[in-house]
Image (cartoon, helix red, strand yellow):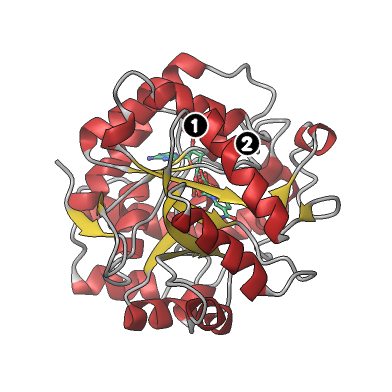
Amino acid sequence: MMRTTTLGSNGPEVGVIGLGCMGMTFSYDMETPRDEATSIAVIRQALDLGMTLIDTADAYGPHTNEELVGRALAGGHRDRAVLATKVGIVRDSVEAADPSNNSADRALDGRPEYIRASIDGSLQRLGTDHVDLYQLHRVDPQVPLEESWGAMAETVAAGKARHIGLSEVTADEIKRAQAVHPVTSVQSELSLWTRDALAAVLPYCQEQGVAFLPFSPLGRGFLAGRFASFDDLPRDDFRRGLPRFQQDALRANLAIVGRVREIAAQAGATPAQVALAWVLAQGRYVVPIPGTKTPKYLADNAGAGDLELSAAHLAELDALPAPEGARY
Ligand SMILES: NC(=O)c1ccc[n+]([C@@H]2O[C@H](COP(=O)([O-])OP(=O)(O)OC[C@H]3O[C@@H](n4cnc5c(N)ncnc54)[C@H](OP(=O)(O)O)[C@@H]3O)[C@@H](O)[C@H]2O)c1
C-alpha cells in the first residue's frame, strides 16, 4: 500500500501520489474513442493501490469528467476516495470541441453566485453529497479574491465541501484567502521542467502547512519519455498548441528526458517514476496528481511512492537545464 501523508497540516490522510482524471475525457487525444470502462477501472485501481486523492473539475469536458468519476465511485467506492473537484473555468461545448483553444475563449467566473450554484451541479454529477476538496480553478481578475473565497467557504459551512483549495495562485493571493478562511491546498504546475512554484509558492505552503498538489508532474507525458517528435502527438491534442511541444523546442527538450532516462536506468526505475520521485522530494505535504487512463502507467506511477532517489541523483535533476519554450 502506498505511503500516506495528510492534505496539509489539518486535512485528511491521502496517498502521497494521487490521480488526475482530466485526460480521461478532455484535452489530450480527443480523436481516439474514449474507453470509459478502462478509465473507470483505472480510478478503482488507484484506490486499491492507495492513490486516494482523485482530482477532476467541472470544466473538464465540460462536465463529462465529473460524470465519469461519479460512475467510477458509484457502488461503494466513494468513501475510499478523497474526492477533489474545481470551479471557476467556464467552457461551453464549442470550446470543449477544440482542446487547442485553451486561453482565448476561456472564461473565468469567480462570482459568488456562480460558485454557489456550481457546487450543486458538481455534486450531482459526482453522485455524492459532499466533495472532500473544492478548488477555485483560477482567480477571476474581475472579482475580488476575497469574494470568491467567501463563497467557497460557504460551501464548507453548507456541508457540501469538507475543505477548500486554490489553483495557480501567488503566495500573496494565498495570504489574502487565508484571512477569510483556511486554505487547505494549492494546485499548481510543478515538474522537472516547470519549477516556478519553488521560488515562493511552495515555500509559503510548507511554512503554513498548506498542501501543494503538483499538476502535470510528468510534463504532460513528455518527461515520461512518451514523445520523441511532434508527430508522435495525437492529432487532436491540446499539447500540439503548447510551445514546448513544437518540433524544434521538443527536439531540444529531449536532452532533459535523455538525462532522466539515464538516472532511471541507474536507479532501477522508469523515467515517470524518477520525475514523480523528484517532485515528491520537494517537500512535506506535496501530493502530485499524475494523469493517466492506462492501467500499466498507473501501476508505474504508484511505484514512485517507494522510490527514494540518492542525493547525487536529486542534485543532478536539480541541475537539469531549463526547457525550450514557454509553459503555455
Ligand atoms: N489546476 C489546473 O489548472 C490543472 C491543469 C492541468 C492539469 N491538472 C490536473 O493535473 C492532472 C495531471 O496533469 P496532466 O494530465 O496534464 O499531465 P501529466 O500527469 O504530467 O501527464 C499525463 C500524460 O502522461 C502520460 N502518462 C502518465 N503516466 C505515465 C507513465 N507512467 N509512463 C508514460 N506515460 C505516462 C498520460 O498518458 P495516458 O493518459 O495515455 O495514460 C498522459 O498523456 C490532470 O489530470 C488534472 O487533474 C490541473
Q: In the rendered view, does 261 fall on the left or right side of 27?
A: left
Q: Tell me what residue is drawn at x 66 percent, y 42 percent.
A: 59
- Left or right, 80 with respect to 201, comes to left
Q: Position of residue 203 (x, y in %)?
A: 39, 82
- Residue 3 visible in the current orientation: yes
**Amino acid beneath label 1:** Leu
Residue 94's label in the rendered image is none
Residue linked to disc 1 = 126
Mark 2 or 1: the one toward you = 1
Disc 1 residue crowd, few under 14, some 14–19, many 20+, Cα 10 Å = many
SS state under label 1: helix
Query: As displayed, is residue 16 above or below residue 169?
Result: above
Which residue is nearer to you in this view: 245 or 165?
Answer: 165
The residue at which mark 2 appears reads as: 28
User: Of 148 and 209, which appears nearest the observer?
Assistant: 148
Which quadrant holds residue 196? bottom right
**Total numbered labels placed on residues in the image:** 2
Residue type, mark 2 in image: Tyr
x 67%, y 67%: residue: 139
Within 8 Å of ligand 1, the CB of disc 2? yes
Residue 3 in the figure: left or right of residue 182: left
Task: Answer with mark 2 or mark 1, whichever residue precedes in sequence.
Answer: 2
Name the image quarter holding residue 229. top right
Vertical relation: 70 (above or below) 156: above
Q: Mark 2 and mark 1: span between their CA atoms?
A: 22 Å
Would you say 52 lies left or right of 33 here? left
